[in-house]
Amino acid sequence: MTENLNEQKTIPTNDKPLVTIVGVLGKQGLSAARTLLASGKYRVRGITRRTDSPEAVELVEQGAELINIPLALGYKKEFIEAFRGADAAFLMTPNIAPPATHEMELGKELAKAAVEAGVGHIVFSSLENVDKITEGTLSAPHFTDKARVEEYIRTLPVQSTFIYMAFFYTNLLEFYTPIEKDGTLVFPIYLPRDFRAPFVDPLTAAGPVVLEILSHPYHYAGKSLPVIGDIISPQEMVDAFVNVTGKKAVYSSAYTREEMLELFPEFTQNEGLVQEILGMVQYAVEYGYFRQDRDLEWSRKINPDALTWEQFLRTTGWNGEKRSF
Ligand SMILES: NC(=O)c1ccc[n+]([C@@H]2O[C@H](COP(=O)([O-])OP(=O)(O)OC[C@H]3O[C@@H](n4cnc5c(N)ncnc54)[C@H](OP(=O)(O)O)[C@@H]3O)[C@@H](O)[C@H]2O)c1
């Protein structure tokens, strides 16, 4: 049996395998699309609502085909069409903030559609089952819902592989942006000052692991694989920021409920979101972000160029301002 998706079917050599990417203009999706296209070995079809955006135009110029579907429930027929003819699919679920609770249902609908369309291999961006690991004592629905989608995909008649992204560096740029106070940037971080947690740049790290998996689909079938760029504490992140940018910066804890609400008073409007964030960080601190038996080295072995936090700061030139992706 051959390993590479390129060789799975008897196809003319100029006909490359097609990969449908869900959330193709999101951070993970864009990384996957850019890496697969740059490899020259795959064709890419992407799902996005923003087919006219500059990022969309750039992907189309690189040869991608884009299909306009929202990542929402009720589009199964459209999803099946988007997966039709694809050899593989990269599936992810977007941030779904409480009170909305449809992440698991959306993930299952995407997977079902991919299987109905005849996709050969699914790569799903999953996370740990916090409910199981903590025996129901902590709740982080956006982790556990993904784990339940993963469990469901494992029951389907399709080859599948699961990537577990570490905390995104981009959280500090998008959501927990530093606040300027008397010439010093105050970094409101949701983890305790000296707690080392796994972090990653989703914009450059997702692509290489998806390419690796699709290049060896039989080898990776059934595996759940963490994707990490650095294992680093908030204080070390702030110190690196000071070194790289020359700016004054300090850490400020947003770990406890009181600290979080003081730094982000707008969160008082969404108690469900507060509970979700507190559950997630308490889980990460008390149990470790990844289950004990996961291979924390794999992603950096297959992609030694995965950016550390310091490299991320240098390559992005981030100076503490708010950015959106
Ligand atoms: N932040 C972290 O530290 C972290 C760590 C591990 C895993 N995760 C998980 O990663 C996922 C987010 O990944 P990402 O940052 O790569 O994705 P993203 O950039 O937030 O979103 C991906 C795409 O989803 C579509 N989308 C988002 N919200 C939507 C909505 N309400 N309705 C319809 N479409 C919507 C958008 O597509 P268009 O606008 O192009 O249509 C967007 O480009 C989440 O599930 C999160 O739990 C996050």
Image: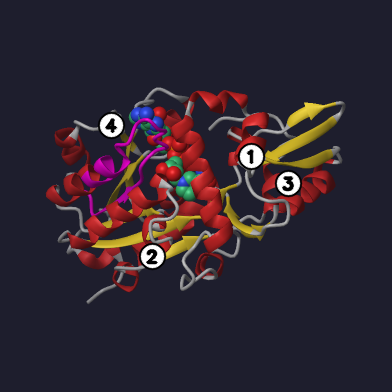
Task: Identify the residue under disc 4.
Answer: 72
Residue at 37% x, 52% y: name it: 144
- Nearer the observer, disc 2 or disc 3? 2
Q: Is mark 1 within 8 Å of ligand 1?
A: no
Image position, residue 184 (x, y; %): 84, 32
- Quarter of the image for the N terminus: give it: bottom left
Which amino acid type corresponds to the residue marked 2 in the rendered image? Ser
Of the two numbered discs 2 and 3 on the same chain, state the one appearing first in sequence. 2
Asked if the stretch drawn in magenta spans residue 94, the answer is yes
Badge 2 is on which residue?
224
Q: Residues within 10 Å of mark 1 (few under 14, many from 20)?
A: some
Query: Does 85 sit left or right of 218 as displayed?
Result: left
Q: Tell me where residue 128 sits by quadrant.
A: bottom left
Disc on the earlier residue, 2 or 1:
1
Numbered-mark total? 4
Name the N-terminal-most of marks 4 and 1. 4
* Residue 26 versus residue 39 in the image, above or below: above
| Closer mark to the observer between disc 4 and disc 3 | 4
The span picked out in magenta is: 86-108
At label 3, the amino acid type is Arg
Which badge, 4 or 3, comes first in the chain's sequence?
A: 4
